[in-house]
Amino acid sequence: MEIRPIFSTILRNPVGLVLIGLQVALTLAIVVNALHIIGTRLDNMRASAGIDENNVLMISSTAFSVDDKPLDIARTDLDYLRSLPGVVNAMAVNTLPMTGSGWSTQVEAAEDPDSHDIATAIYFADETLVETLGLDLIAGRPFRAGEVTPFSMDDNLRPPVVIASAAAVLDLFPDLERPEDALGRLIWNGDENDRAASEIIGIVDGIKAPWRGFSVKIFDHVTFVPHIPTFDKSARYAIRSEAGQLDKLAGNVREQLAAQNLRRVVGEPRTFPEVRERFLRGDKSMAVMLIAVVVLLLLVNVLGIVGLVSFWVTQRTKQIGTRRALGATRGNILRYFLIENALITSVGVLLGAVLAMALSNWLASEFSVHRLPWYYLAYGAALLNALGLFATCLPALRAAGIAPAIATRSV
Amino acid sequence: MLSMQDLSKVYRTHLVETHALREFSIHVEEGEFVAVTGPSGSGKTTFMNIAGLLEEHSGGRYQLDGVEVSGLSDRERSAMRNEKLGFIFQGFNLIPDLNLFDNVDVPLRYRGFGAKERKLRIERALEQVGLGSRARHYPAELSGGQQQRVAIARALAGEPRILLADEPTGNLDSAMARAVMEILEGINAAGTTIIMVTHDPELAARARRNVHIIDGQVTDLQSSFADSALGVSAPRESAA
Ligand SMILES: Nc1ncnc2c1ncn2[C@@H]1O[C@H](COP(=O)(O)OP(=O)(O)OP(=O)(O)O)[C@@H](O)[C@H]1O
Ligand SMILES: [Mg+2]
């Protein structure tokens, strides 16, 4: 109702507009992006790893000596593990989803080393991979036994065939409409003088990489290569139990495996639910930290507004008394400050929306996180407006209580 | 128009009680121009504040324009100030961040007039005090006398029944004071009741009725004085 004179008053003393406007703008920009990251993290916590999580464990074995022929040990161990009751299948692996460590490499869509590329995690696997991990193979075929070869630390990674995640092929070949259409395509790696191509023979859906970092996309980029890892003395096995047998298997498998070959140390088995729990601990603490930052920023924002409006109320005491003398009700005075704050906050929110998008674009390009969805801005703007009004209420109620006699009594 | 009977006003702090007004009675008829004089601390501002519904009285009866004021709610008192009363303050009390137009607009907005009506009234009121061409200026760009004329325009724009002025010329030199006084006399001649506190005997003498307050009580120098001898109140005033 009295927006125009309030606005011109604000413009005549733009310090408050600048202070509160900037504060609101920065708060909005940071808070909505933080909330977006929190939201993404919470989605991650719900995300499946793309394997039969409840029935897979990983166990490692380290031989005493390099001379002990790691490939032979692996083959013997796998034969033994596959023969155990309650075991569906087992294979030698380098890592599993969400373990936090593993290999990644750059792959290109064409022979030219400068062509479009993505980073992808590398999983070693043999012909049992679909069964051992419980993968969702949506197109193509698993590796054949004849395709699987040993791989030592000295070898270059140049597998003739690979199985890739749906997300990886879609990002590597943007022209694809469906991930299935990537079957038969080649992916390239290696340096300029030593290019190697691998044919995509299978597509797996939903499989996750060992890590995520800040990037969301990396988490979905996975490539399986047909190799048995033979890294010096150590080996790792993924074992899938029959449904519901995982704990029982985890309780016995270490001793059983150790008894097969005394010239090595067998590690504590890690069930996948444990792996996942440990992995998401980071997400939880990140979410908690960001929530703390958000709460702190909002609190600072509220206190800033309370402080400045209190100052204004004190500064305008005589003016408020005069307005009361001229016929303003307490409600009129309260409304004056609320409108004033709403105007300033709105300017801040507009500026903040621009800043928030800029920040989001930067995060998107720098860390390949997803863009900020518009509704985060809408909720953020509503939240800051509501908080602004709440913060204004406290000093504004004091203003509404100023006696009209102040008009004649003060100098 | 305005009638106070045995009014009292007590200020209580935790240490002392001040009886600012005691058995205070006054009756002002429609169209009167009353000059209120008295020594400092005698209760003039207290009287004006109660008359103007800026403060509540402690005891006695007060009727304003036929309405018994005691039982009114804060909202009703605000509406009465807005519609029936006009205020002129010693310190002008203009809002520094609003131009003259918007300053005069303040009470009209509380009144709820439409934009057209407000514009008409603002322009007319500023015209009336000779500042029609300065509507877009800010108070700081005006002299004290001009600022007080804006305050008068603000008080007039709502066409009040009573104009209350507490030392309106207290911050002005004598030339500016006379100019303000002339405007007030014009307003009074047009029918508006005026009650004015002043320390200036010359101005008090120009009013048709003088009321002297001493120690929170009225010493009325009857209305008849005003008609017969204008100068009578002057010696009294010099005592203050
Ligand atoms: N809010 C208050 N609390 C306590 N005492 C007050 C208050 N306001 C006024 N008084 C006291 O009431 C008495 C009358 O004060 P008032 O302001 O009405 O005098 P005045 O005639 O207007 O004086 P002046 O000519 O100096 O303006 C004084 O003793 C003053 O100290
Ligand atoms: Mg006084």
Image (cartoon, rainbow, N blue to C red):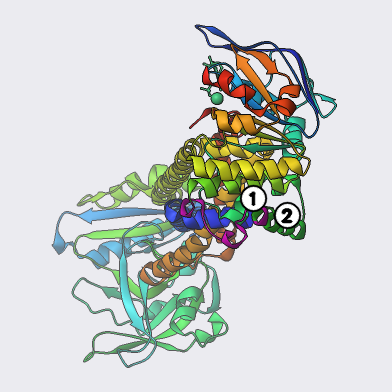
Indicate the amino acid at tag 2.
Answer: Arg
Image-quarter location of ligand 1: top right
Name the mark on residue B104. Answer: 1
Q: Tell me the quarter of the picture where residue B233 sits.
A: top right
At 78% from the left edge and 40% from the top edge, which residue is drawn?
Answer: B191
Q: Secondary structure at mark 2?
A: helix
Is B138 one of the magenta-colored residues?
A: yes
Q: Position of residue A176 (x, y in %)?
A: 53, 86
Indicate the amino acid at tag 1.
Answer: Val
- Observer able to see residue A172: yes
Q: Tell me the quarter of the picture where residue B80 sits.
A: top right
Q: Secondary structure at mark 1?
A: helix
Q: Tell me the quarter of the picture where residue B6 sits.
A: top right
Q: Chain of mark 2?
A: B
Seen from this angle, which residue lies furthest right?
B66
Ligand 2 closer than 8 Å to label 2 CB: no
Given residues A356 and A263, the one toward you in this image is A356
Mark 2–mark 1 CB contact (< 8 Å):
yes
Give the distance between the C-alpha atoms of the residues marked 2 and 1, in whole angstroms.
Answer: 9 Å
What are the residue bounds of the magenta stretch? B127-142
At 60% from the left edge and 45% from the top edge, which residue is drawn?
Answer: B151
Is B112 one of the magenta-colored residues?
A: no
Q: Is residue B112 left or right of residue B168?
A: right
Identify the residue under disc 2. Answer: B121
At 45% from the left edge and 53% from the top edge, which residue is drawn?
Answer: A27
Residue A13 vertical placement versus A402 (above, below): below
Q: Is residue A264 left or right of residue A386?
A: left
Q: Chain of mark 1?
A: B
At 47% from the left edge and 89% from the top edge, which residue is drawn?
Answer: A184
The answer to whether dots 2 and 1 both sit on one chain is yes
Q: Between disc 2 and disc 1, whose residue precedes?
A: 1
Q: Position of residue B166 (x, y in %)?
A: 59, 31
